[in-house]
Amino acid sequence: MSPLRRPLLRTGALALAAGTMIALVGCAASDDAADAGSTGTITPVIVDINEIDGTTIQVVEGNVIDLTGDDDTYLDWTADIADTSVVEFTPGKDDGSAQFNPGLTALSPGESEVALDNSASGDTVTFTVEVTAKD
């Protein structure tokens, strides 16, 4: 083998080894992040507003329900909540730099019926939210 090819092969092997180490470190960091999420981070319950009519949504106390699926009239949803000690409505908003879906916050264990009305589209959606206690 020529003397010129030997350094190139070593350089290629070193680059491959370094890339493998970086990939393994990245995987380890991802696994740690996933483990941290399972021990303390609460992820929102994401539901499509077009598919929840007549259903029951279960959520842990302190968590939120993100109501997706309405990109056009998300600002026009309002809520009538039977038991406001169980769940609270947050309207959609647009602050000029970002758009936020409407949502619900689980306040305390219990169950409440929720009726959402959209003044722009005339749509009405009724469902139940069941809030369970934190472990």
Image: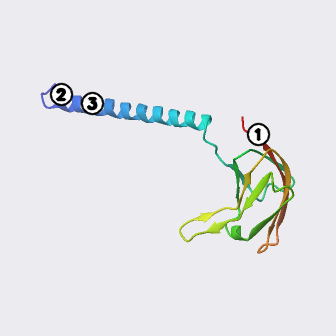
Q: Which is more foreground, mark 3 or mark 2?
A: 3
Position of residue 135 measured from the top left corner of the image (x, y, whole percent): 72, 34
Q: Amino acid at mark 3?
A: Leu
Q: Nearer the viewer, residue 117 or 8?
A: 117
Residue in view at x 78 percent, y 53 percent: 87
SS for callout 3: helix
| Residue identifier under label 1 | 133
Residue in view at x 70 percent, y 47 percent: 62
Mark 2 crowdedness (10 Å alpha carbons): few <14, some 14-19, many ≥20: few
Position of residue 34 measured from the top left corner of the image (x, y, whole percent): 56, 36
| Residue 28 versus residue 66 in the image, above or below | above
Badge 3 or badge 1: first in the primary sequence: 3
| Residue 22 versus residue 65 in the image, above or below | above
Question: Which quadrant would residue 122 be assigned to in this image?
Answer: bottom right
Q: How many marks can you see?
A: 3
Residue in view at x 42 percent, y 31 percent: 24
Mark 3 crowdedness (10 Å alpha carbons): few <14, some 14-19, many ≥20: few
Q: Nearer the viewer, residue 3 or 92?
A: 92
SS for callout 1: loop
Residue in view at x 64 percent, y 67 percent: 93
Real-space Cα distance between discs 3 and 1?
53 Å
| Residue identifier under label 3 | 14
Position of residue 130 measured from the top left corner of the image (x, y, whole percent): 82, 46
Q: Nearer the viewer, residue 114 or 31?
A: 114
Query: Which label sits on residue 6?
Result: 2
Q: Amino acid at mark 1?
A: Ala
| Residue 25 versus residue 116 in the image, above or below | above
Position of residue 33 measured from the top left corner of the image (x, y, whole percent): 52, 37
Badge 1 or badge 2: first in the primary sequence: 2
Badge 3 or badge 2: first in the primary sequence: 2
Q: Amino acid at mark 2?
A: Arg
